[in-house]
Amino acid sequence: MAVAANATDRQTVVYQNQFQTSHWQNSFTLDKSLFADLQTGDVLWVLAAKDETSIGYDDNNDGTATDHAWYQLSVSIPTSGSWTDIVNSADMANVPYWSTTLTEGQVSSIKADGLAFAGHCVYVKAVAFGSTFATTAVQHWDSSSNAWSTEGFTISSDKDTWASQTLNTSGQLSDARIGDRITVNYTTTATSEWDARVQISDATDNNNWVTLFDFPAGTKTSITFPVTADNYSRITSGDIRIGGCNYDVTSIILETTSLYYRLSAFDDNVALANIPTQYAVNIDLYRKYDWNTTLCVPFDLASVTTAFGPTAKAYEFKEYNSGLMFTEREHIEAGKPYLMTFDMTGVEESAKTMTKTFEDVTLNTTLTNSAESGGLTFKGNYTPSFDMTGKYGVACKDMGESAEPRWVWGFYKGASGSKLNAFSAYFEGSIQAARLSIILDEDETTGINDNNRETITNNGDFYSLSGQRITMPSKGLYIKDSKKIIVK
């Protein structure tokens, strides 16, 4: 089964939501499975924000539970119950974008134990890892020369005098995407934090300037802010203004990356609702594949074999008539459930769970049920640990060493408490059978007629559609003497 190779310039988003740390009262952990592709030298970055709404802690001992004198974020490796900090930053009030290059030891520990997050009055909004960013100089409007320039400019030499310059009035940032970042590099003679200041704003439709970020600049040499779902439209379409006092800008850089959103069939750390739909994105889908697998994904795929490899086949539910009839399809539609078959010869069980990469796909999160027939409906599922009690999910049952065939695929009714992983599909209906057999039609144009129907009465060589030799087949569709045979 083919799996796309990882690109060298990629970042994978493993969390995008809004986790509230409060006053060290809450913490959360990202599972090690999310970091399976992590490599030594990758950059780990975290987007955070002040939480000025937290209650329950009086910083200043003045009886006010909502005031905060400081904001802190802890990012740690939770090894054997003892957290080892990668960062423990007390300046998250003014530096919302934090990143570090990971060592070999850190990568090994994260892949073994995952990452833990806690803090004081901070929201954790996004976590990602990947390669370094590609950089592009961004032009700004130089009012002294009345021209666009990539050279540095002086805001002011007086810390009490405010001045500004504008960029993006001609679309210099129109190609920015969520996950990119903008860096303003500068020099300053300030000796304390607020002796210099950088404010980044954008203009609304009625030309009112709205502050995106306001930083103390006196003890730093650069300010970096990310393009997020919240500010994307404002940054890419608005007029961005860099303003402040007491510093000289040396460059403005747009840093871009190939951003990959990770979807896991087993957890919902990156919710579908938080992935951009306004432009094509890259998706890393982490889930299990097998000889027979159900699939439902929130994007179109034009070619099944291009997406999943030469042995992959996709089937759409057609009807229920003593068995579940499926018809082969060459492409996959967003939100529609399918039965998939793969040749898993020689593939170890542990290797069937893998990351599959889909590039330049546009998300459509609407689920579309397949045909309803015989009281059954084939439905897609995007929810991890979906309750399958009384519903039918695809599985293979061991019938015992003496049985022929020993392994029988079908849709089996879920017992109480049984669960289904996300990005899969299931049958729901009033049928009471414990197992529903699968019948595959691989050629919709000719179908299967009476000339290739045959009742099995001997022990000839039959093969499943996946190439497995079957000594005594049960009901279903098989290959014999290069012909498709239905066993009744």
Image (cartoon, helix red, strand yellow):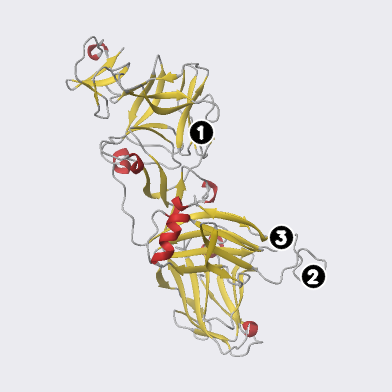
Report the amino acid beneath label 3: Ser
Determine whether 229 is above or below 401 in the image. below
How far is the residue under mark 2 from the one under mark 1?
A: 49 Å
In space, the residues marked 2 and 3 are separated at their CA atoms by 15 Å
* 343 or 248, nearer to the observer: 343
Q: Which mark is residue 339?
A: none
Find residue 129 and report its horizontal and vertical position in percent.
44, 61
Locate residue 428, reporting x and y percent.
Answer: 51, 24
Tell me which amino acid carries mark 2: Asn
Q: Label 3: state its secondary structure.
A: loop
**Residue sticking out furthest to the left:** 481
Q: 47 or 23, which is in the foreground? A: 23
Quadrant in the picture for the C terminus: top left
Q: Which residue is mark 2?
A: 61
Instruction: Determine whether 304 is above or below 126 in the image.
Output: above
**Residue picked out by circle 1:** 419
User: What's the mark number on residue 54?
Assistant: 3
Question: Residue at coordinates 31% horizontally, 53% vertically from top-left?
Answer: 5
Going from N to C along the chain, the mark reached first, 1 or 3, is: 3
Dot 2 crowding, Cα within 10 Å, few <14, some 14–19, many 20+? few
The mark lying in front, picked from 2 and 3, is 2
For residue 359, side relative to residue 449 (left or right): right
Q: At x 48% / y 61%, what residue is drawn?
A: 179
The answer to which of marks 2 and 1 sits earlier in the sequence is 2
Q: Say what amino acid the circle numbered 1 marks.
A: Lys
- Across and down, in percent, residue 437 comes to 38, 20
Q: Disc 1 vs disc 3: Cβ atoms closer than 8 Å?
A: no
Q: Where the N terminus falls, by quadrant? A: top left
Q: Earlier in the sequence, mark 2 or mark 3?
A: 3
Q: Is residue 132 visible?
A: no
